Amino acid sequence: MDTYKTIEAPAEGIYKARGSKFLSFAYPVTSVEEVKTLVDEKRKEFYDARHICYAYMLGPKRTEFRSNDDGEPSSTAGRPILGQINSNQLTNILIIVVRYFGGILLGTSGLITAYKSAAAEAIASSNIIDCFIESIYMVTFGYEQMNDVMRIIKEYDLKVLSQEQTLSCKLIFSVRQSLESQVYDRFSTLELVTIDKAE
C-alpha cells in the first residue's frame, strides 16, 4: 500500500452530556512541533476550560502517536480520541477536545463515551482524503533529452517540484512508491540522463 488517509483541513465538532460541553477540533499535522503549537494555542484560547485532552497520529505508516488525558481519569479521554483516529484509519492528524464541566460527574464510561463522541463529531465534519506515499528524485539531462524526459514525466503523471535549465537541465519530481522502480528504470534507459534520489 502506498496510500494513507488524512483530513484536508481543520474541522470542528461538539458533544454535550449532562451539562458538560466537549468542543472538538481536528487538524491536519505532520510534526510533533505542530501538535505542541496547536495544543498551546487551544490552552490559551480556552484558558477557563477544565480539561484540554488530545491525541495524534503521525506518518504514513501510522507509527508515531500519543494521547493525553490532561487530568481526566487515566485512559478516559486521550485513548478514546485516539481510538476514533484508529477506527477511521487516519494519520497526520491531531484531535483536541476541550471540556467545560457542567457540574455533574459523568463517571468513567460516561467520560469515555463523551470524548469518543466528540472526536467522532470532528472527524465526521472533516473531508477525509487519500494521500500517496511519495519519494523525491532528481533527474539531470542535456537539453536534447528534454522531450524524452518530459514524455516519462507525463506518462507516469509525476509531480514536478522544481526545474532549472542552465547548461544542463535539472528536474526534481515526486513519484508514488508503488511506481518508483518502474520510473527509475525508464529514466535509467535514457542515454546521457542521470537519476538519483533527492536529499
Image: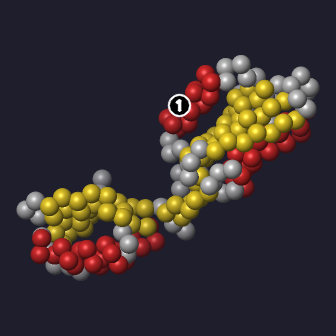
Figure check: 160 above or below 41: below
- Tell me the residue at 28%/60% (across/down): 172
Figure check: 122 above or below 70: below
Identity of the residue furthest to the left in this view: 167
What is the x, y in percent for residue 37? 53, 31
Which is nearer the eye, 178 or 20?
Answer: 20
Tag count: 1
Left/right of residue 89 with respect to residue 64 in the rendered view: right
**Quarter of the rendering occupied by the N terminus:** bottom right
Res 78 seen here: no
Which colour scheme appears in the figure? secondary structure
What is the x, y in percent for residue 27? 59, 43
* Residue named by callout 1: 37
- Tell me the residue at 59%/44% (across/down): 10
Q: Identify the image quadrant of residue 73.
A: top right
Identity of the residue furthest to the top in this view: 48
Figure check: 115 above or below 103: below
Q: Amino acid at mark 1?
A: Thr
- Tell me the residue at 67%/20% (across/down): 47
- Tell me the residue at 53%/51% (across/down): 59
What is the x, y in percent for residue 100? 78, 26
Which is nearer the eye, 95 or 76?
Answer: 95
Res 156 seen here: yes
Left/right of residue 120 with respect to residue 150 in the rendered view: right
What is the x, y in percent for residue 145? 16, 75
Mark 1 burial class by Cα count in 10 Å: few <14, some 14-19, many 20+: few
Figure check: 166 above or below 180: above
Which is nearer the eye, 82 or 118?
Answer: 118
